Image (cartoon, rainbow, N blue to C red):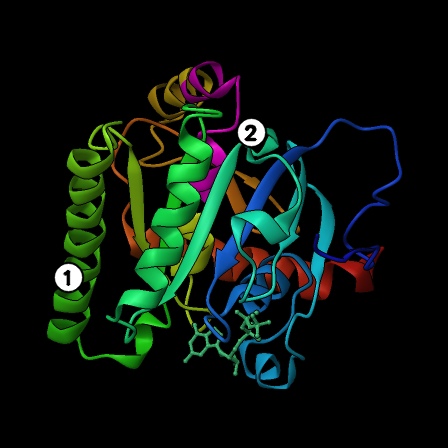
């Protein structure tokens, strides 16, 4: 059974409040970047400060209030299904972080272990794979490693489907290229959140209406402090526009308190 602790950092809420929170399990091998992801997104840690993060020795639960109240479980790299000691069915999403240079078996085996254990308990879990530290590679290598990780996970799921009986071929996995050094992390986590927002179609309709009536080329509904967007209109998201909005919100967050 794993040890647990909880945080109440300034931007997060008290875990003992009575709010019902959507739970997200954050998994990956040691040093893959789990704590960095969580700290950069929700505690405004600068990417360079992630060098000094201590290894996670026990499951740490963080509560955050975005449009939907979240509870993110940051796990140690050596956690297994058995040592987690909590039912996987309670999680809405599992985010698995893989270092983009890590093409070896260990990370993929761990991901598959958690998929197999959770899928039959709750086939509605969203599986999100963050192929992380993407900025470390040149564009061609980045695309190639991303493709290989995707392929290896799919092949492994196919293999165990035929060996063990149950079929994992239809498991829906969402792959994202991420880095704490650019806004790809915010974009990827926003996409994770979209699947958890019940009112998404309604919000998208509102934003479509807004664009049509205001002749705006694009509209995002952002959670200001985390800089995650909760919804956007039907037109495609281009990274440049998204990055510009993130930079702008970063500036508002930095200077806004001076004028209060
Ligand atoms: N280049 C690069 N380094 C990163 C990125 N994200 C995290 N790191 C680095 O990766 C190292 C490990 O980060 P952590 O966040 O501690 O990793 P972890 O998965 O929580 O590690 P454990 O707690 O040991 O399981 C740190 O030196 C971070 O600075 C990234 O996007 N790019």
Q: Which residues are magenta?
A: 190-204
Residue 226 seen in render: no
Query: What SS does tag 2 mark?
Result: helix
Earlier residue among tags 1 and 2: 2
**Could you tell me how far apart the alpha carbons at marks 1 and 2 are, in whole angstroms?**
29 Å
Which residue is at the front of the view, 54 or 235? Answer: 54
Q: Which mark is residue 89?
A: 2
Tell me the crowding category of disc 1: few under 14, some 14 to 19, or many 20 or more residues within 10 angstroms, Cα based: some
Q: Which residue: 45% across, 30% down?
A: 125
Query: What SS does tag 1 mark?
Result: helix
- Quadrant of the rendered structure where residue 90 is? top right
Label 2 residue near ligand 1, CB within 8 Å: no
Which residue is at the front of the view, 215 or 242? Answer: 242
Q: In the rendered view, does 39 fall on the left or right side of 179? A: right
Q: In the rendered view, does 93 fall on the left or right side of 60? A: left
Which residue is at the front of the view, 118 or 130? Answer: 118
Q: Which residue: 33% across, 20% down?
A: 212
Q: Which mark is residue 148?
A: 1
Question: Which quarter shows the C terminus?
Answer: bottom right
Overall secondary structure of the magenta section: helix
Tell me the crowding category of disc 2: few under 14, some 14 to 19, or many 20 or more residues within 10 angstroms, Cα based: some
- Is 60 one of the magenta-colored residues? no
* Vertical arrangement, residue 170 with respect to residue 223, above or below: above
Q: Which residue: 15% across, 48% down?
A: 155
Q: Which residue: 42% across, 16% down?
A: 201
Question: Residue 213: where, in percent of width, then height?
Answer: 38, 19
Residue 203 seen in render: yes
* Contact, mark 1 vs mark 2 (Cβ under 8 Å): no
Question: Residue 108: where, in percent of width, then height?
Answer: 31, 58
Question: Residue 124: where, in percent of width, then height?
Answer: 43, 23
Please tell me whether mark 1 or mark 2 is closer to you in this view.
2
């Amino acid at each position: 059974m794993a040890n647990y602790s909880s945080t109440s950092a300034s931007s997060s809420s008290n875990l003992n409040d009575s709010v019902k929170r959507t739970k997200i399990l954050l998994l990956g091998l040691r040093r893959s970047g789990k704590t960095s992801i969580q700290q950069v997104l929700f505690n405004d840690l600068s990417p360079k400060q992630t060098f000094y993060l201590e290894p996670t020795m026990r499951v740490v639960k963080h509560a955050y209030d975005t449009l939907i109240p979240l509870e993110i479980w940051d796990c140690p790299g050596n956690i297994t299904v058995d040592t987690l000691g909590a039912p996987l069915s309670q999680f809405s999403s599992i985010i698995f972080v893989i270092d983009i240079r890590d093409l070896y078996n260990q990370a993929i085996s761990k991901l598959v272990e958690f998929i197999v254990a959770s899928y039959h308990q709750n086939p509605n879990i969203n599986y999100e794979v963050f192929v992380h530290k993407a900025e470390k590679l040149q564009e061609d290598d980045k695309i190639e490693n991303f493709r290989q990780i995707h392929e290896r996970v799919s092949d492994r799921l196919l293999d165990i489907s035929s060996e063990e009986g149950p079929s994992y071929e239809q498991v829906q996995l969402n792959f994202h290229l991420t880095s704490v050094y650019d806004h790809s992390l915010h974009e990827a986590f926003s996409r994770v959140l979209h699947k958890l927002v019940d009112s998404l179609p309604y919000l998208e309709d509102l934003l479509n209406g807004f664009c049509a009536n205001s002749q705006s080329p694009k509209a995002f509904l952002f959670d200001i402090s985390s800089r995650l967007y909760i919804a956007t209109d039907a037109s495609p998201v281009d990274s440049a526009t998204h990055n510009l909005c993130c930079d702008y919100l970063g500036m508002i967050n930095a200077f806004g308190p001076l004028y209060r």
